[in-house]
Image (cartoon, grey):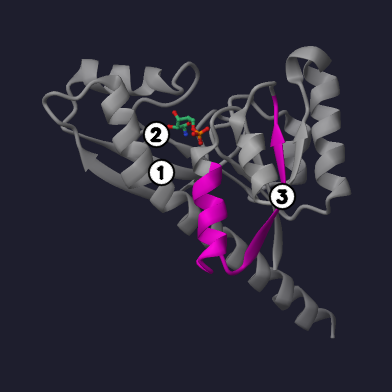
Amino acid sequence: MMRIAVLVSGGGSNLQALIDSEKRGKLRSGRICLVIADREGAYALERAKHAGIKALLINKKALGKEPFEAALQEALLEADIDCVILAGFLSILGQTILDAYQNRIINVHPSLIPAFCGDGFYGLKVHEAALKRGVKLSGATVHYVNHITDGGEILLQKALPVKKDDTPESLQQRIMEKAEWQILPRAAEMLCRRLCKERNDAKRKTK
Ligand code: GRF
């Protein structure tokens, strides 16, 4: 059973999808052991507390970049975390954590990468750009996190039609409900299952 940390910055609807997925027994190979917010006022922390999950605020603005990174690393280590899920997390992770959790960090992005991603594409900005470009399909992507923003290997994607009368808000809501909240829990199970297998294979080798 992998120990999962979920990093958040906002409302936590993707975190809630992960929590609900675990409750329904869909997230079988991992357990959410820790939720960390990088800023004050993230309702996601309330969701974690309500679900009985350890919830931490590590305030990046108050701490500054390096101390934030160090505190984040310390919290992950202390909780013996195996893998990290970025769920509406708006801070860029530094190289120390990326190296420590290589191929063990995933992120959900609200577009079909490589469209509308990278620096500056987050939240409503993604959907504003999609509507401005006039794409007929958009959706969500779960990908591994590396040193390139939204640049890691793609794990899962789900596409949805863009409606003629869509606003950035209506498109965001539909992509969250019909895409993000579906594929993030599925990707989390894929990640944890792979890590469990790797751990068991390593144990067999040492016998
Ligand atoms: C939303 O824009 C979502 O598309 C993106 O992060 C934002 C907040 O998500 N992934 P959440 O409700 O905090 O999970």
Mark 2 near ligand 1 (CB under 8 Å)? yes
Q: CA distance from mark 2 to mark 3?
A: 25 Å
Residue bearing the label numbered 3: 53
Q: Nearer the viewer, residue 103 or 34?
A: 34
Residue bearing the label numbered 2: 110
- Indicate the position of residue 175 as horizontal and vertical percent values: 32, 37
Q: Is residue 99 left or right of residue 193?
A: right
Identify the residue at horizontal 72%, vertical 36% (top origin): 36
Q: Residue furthest left?
A: 164
Please provide the residue range marked out in magenta: 15-38
Q: Nearer the viewer, residue 42 or 188?
A: 42
Amino acid of disc 2: Pro
Amino acid of disc 1: Glu
Task: Locate the C terminus and report the quarter of the image it occupies.
Answer: bottom right
Report crowding for label 2: few under 14, some 14 to 19, many 20 or more residues within 10 A (C-alpha): many
SS at mark 3 in the image: loop
Identify the residue at horizontal 19%, vertical 27% (top origin): 135
- Disc 2 and disc 1 in contact, CB within 8 angstroms: yes
> Which tag is nearer the camera, tag 2 or tag 3?
3
Identify the residue at horizontal 64%, vertical 73% (top origin): 197
Is the residue 57 above or below the residue 83 in the image? above
Query: Of marks 2 and 3, which one's residue comes earlier in the chain?
Result: 3
Mark 1 near ligand 1 (CB under 8 Å)? yes
Q: Is residue 112 visible?
A: no
Residue bearing the label numbered 1: 180
Q: CA distance from mark 1 to mark 3?
A: 21 Å
Mark 3 near ligand 1 (CB under 8 Å)? no
Q: Nearer the viewer, residue 28 or 111?
A: 28
- Indicate the position of residue 110 as horizontal and vertical percent values: 39, 34
